[in-house]
Amino acid sequence: MKKFNINSLVRENILKLQPYISFRDHNEFNAPVLLDANECPFGEFNRYPDSSQKKLKNKLASLKNLSPAQIAIGNGSDELIDLTIKIFCEPKKDAILMMNPSFAMYGFYAAVNENEVIKLDLDENFEIVKDDFLKVTQERQIKIFFLCSPNNPTGNSVEDIEFFIQNFEGIVVIDEAYIEFSGKKSGIEWLAQYPNVIVLQTFSKAWGTAGARVGTAYASEEIIRFINTVKAPYNVNSLSQELILNLLEDENKLKENVENVLKEREWLKEEFKKIDCIEKVFPTDANFFLIKMKDGQKVYEKMLEEEVLTSQRAPAIPNCIRINVGTREENEKLVNVLKGIES
């Protein structure tokens, strides 16, 4: 196991912070009269949700072969990204490292917390250059390294993630929002060996519940304890907790969603080969494609005119558009619009 002293990385004020504890959620009662939380006694959803998400954590723990104490539940992965930065990064002092291009919210939440954002430019294949990584981490004091794999918006998985874990002295956050589409192993398998690793997953993508806003963090019990200390007491609502619990009871739901997306992804990949305005389709392990167009601005505007909404990645990635996989009906409209665009 890698030697790691978490207290040396956590902000001093967070080390001293006492969590808000819901007395109700941390004790067992048979038939309690609930007069402790200033709730309205009437209404279908009049009671606060379980602040510790016990049922959901227990279910996930059994599925992931972890302890419930190694799991934190967030209002989407975004909240967990924000909390991680707040726990480890002193405002106006500490820095984070992120891939470039990658998910913009790492830099956004760091900026909100007044932390420097150091961007590690990827090569022409959107891979991390190891020498560049070693150089910047040796020259700079960096608290958190955000690794998005598969990466958004490029779609490719990060190769040799363990190398970056082994050669970074701070917290390594592996964001696996799209892991189910990749066929790759999760970084969860490294938690016992590397106590500085946090793995983020979400129910927004492959599970098809983006509207419920539920994300998960898997890490050491020490790190999870700090996340639970800093998070809002009732950060995940009752409806979302119940929805995810019900989803987890259906073993086929995730498999069905992933199979359908992969089938459509392959269909789109073949159709894109026939489209003249497309210059290059980058390899993807996610539920989306990064596509270089001959004239990205023109293609984007033409699709928008037809109410086909996509994500323009220029100027950061010139002439590139990110397009996620839809239903066959949606994909057919996309392809027909693209085929009608002159290059």
Image (cartoon, grey):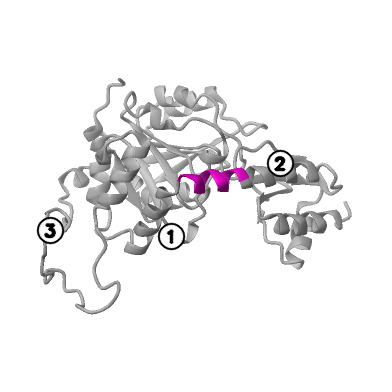
- Specify whether 92 is left or right of 37: right
The quarter of the displayed image where residue 7 is located: top left
Residue corresponding to mark 2: 266
- Specify whether 222 is left or right of 278: left
Q: Main secondary structure of the magenta part?
A: helix
- Dividing the image into 4 quarters, which one contains the N terminus? top left
| Mark 1–mark 2 distance (CA, rounded to whole Å) | 28 Å
| Mark 3–mark 2 distance (CA, rounded to whole Å) | 51 Å
Mark 1, Cα crowd under 10 Å, few <14 / some 14-19 / many 20+, is some
Examine the rendered structure and indicate whether residue 235 appears above or below residue 73: below
User: Where's residue 89, x and y in %?
Assistant: 32, 43
Q: Which mark is residue 304?
A: none
Examine the rendered structure and indicate whether residue 8 appears above or below residue 89: above
Tell me if residue 253 is in the magenta stretch: yes
Q: State which region is magenta.
A: 251-259
Label 3 is placed on what type of residue? Phe
Label 1 is placed on what type of residue? Ala
